[in-house]
Image (cartoon, rainbow, N blue to C red):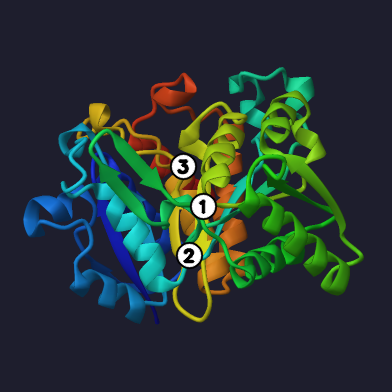
Amino acid sequence: MAHIVTLPGDGIGPEILAAARRVLDAVGEFSYEEHRFGGAAIDEHGTALTDETLDACRRADAVLLAAVGGPKWDSTDPGAPRPEQGLLGLRKGLGLFANLRPVRPVPALLDASPLKPEVLRGTDLLVVRELTGGIYFGEKAREGRRARDVCEYDTSEIERIARVAFEAARTRVTSVDKMNVLETSRLWREVVARVHREEFPNVELEHQLVDSAAMKLVAAPRHFDVILTENMFGDILSDEAAMLTGSLGMLPSASLGGDGPGVFEPVHGSAPDIAGRGIANPLAMFLSAAMLLRHGLGMEAEAAAVESAVDRALAGGLRTADLGGEATTAEATDVVLGELA
């Protein structure tokens, strides 16, 4: 029986994770182990990620994470613990160097997008973001009125994330950088081009500057198959790509590494303004659970069943508040479970 560590986190996290467990239990048998994480762990333990939680995650077959953060823990004090530190620690501790964010607008929700349906229709892309290097993990310092964040990459970090992108591609990899300004981007472009030439010559490779890619994502999203990029650019572009669907409440993600367990989580935040009201959209959590089934446990048929159930529920008219409807978290869960039956 597969063992899943669950990290409800903050805000709406406990609500949507409980709903996701109902969906998982409808397609398989799993054991669960829950731990506090993010702001909830700061309140109880003084740190966003305890050693006990990290050890439990290392022993698991997969980790299902809901959401972290909220204004309660916002601070400009560099010494104050922050919920997001838990995410960085989890990624580093589990060696999760590749973040996958699929963006496939559901036909039933094309009208919810800020883009015209004719621009968006047919979009089916994957953002592959390097997750454990770059400016997020470089040296940080503050000295009086000055602050410093160092962006660093080495060749091996770029090689391994490039391979993930090329292996996932159907036709094309668009490698995104800022090589006209940044030395790390010049190394990035050189290494990606070499990996392409030596290992994946049958996949098309194009290079784009990050500002150009950001514009093209809005103007012609169908152009993209796989977008490959470093940590900070990927953080920004993946949220932009997610909004093409009209709601961050619809997008899942997977963070993968080597031989250890992956972490699966929705793209959206903790939405503390609606926490406890039972109206959160659980669909991205369900789709993250589907990615857990596929990438974490190798259960492709079960993953496809969950994704199909979500599509059919939306086609049948299911709409939570963020999608312009009135369905509660429980009602949305019941509809998807009905489609799985």
Q: Which residue is disc 2 drawn over?
A: 27
CA neighbours of label 1 inside 10 A, class few (<14), some (14 to 19), many (20+): many
CA neighbours of label 2 inside 10 A, class few (<14), some (14 to 19), many (20+): some
Q: Nearer the viewer, mark 2 or mark 1?
A: 1
Mark 2 vs mark 3, CA separation in Å: 16 Å
Q: Are marks 2 and 3 in contact (CB under 8 Å)?
A: no
Q: Amino acid at mark 2?
A: Val
Q: Earlier in the sequence, mark 2 or mark 1?
A: 2
Which structural element holds mark 2?
Answer: helix
- Vertical order, 108 against 85 (above or below): above
Which structural element holds mark 3?
Answer: helix
Can residue 270 be seen here? The reply is no
Q: Nearer the viewer, residue 64 or 84?
A: 84
Mark 2 vs mark 1, CA separation in Å: 20 Å
Residue at figure coordinates x 64%, y 64% from the top left = 158
Q: Which residue is disc 1 drawn over?
A: 253
Q: Amino acid at mark 3?
A: Leu
Residue 221, position as x, y percentages in the image: 74, 33
Residue 264 appears left or right of 175: left
Residue at figure coordinates x 24%, y 32% from the top left = 272
Q: Amino acid at mark 1?
A: Ser
Residue at figure coordinates x 59%, y 52% from the top left = 230
Residue 277, position as x, y percentages in the image: 22, 30
Residue 153 appears left or right of 337: right
Q: Which residue is disc 3 drawn over?
A: 283
Which structural element holds mark 1?
Answer: strand
Q: Are marks 1 and 3 in contact (CB under 8 Å)?
A: no
Mark 1 vs mark 3, CA separation in Å: 12 Å
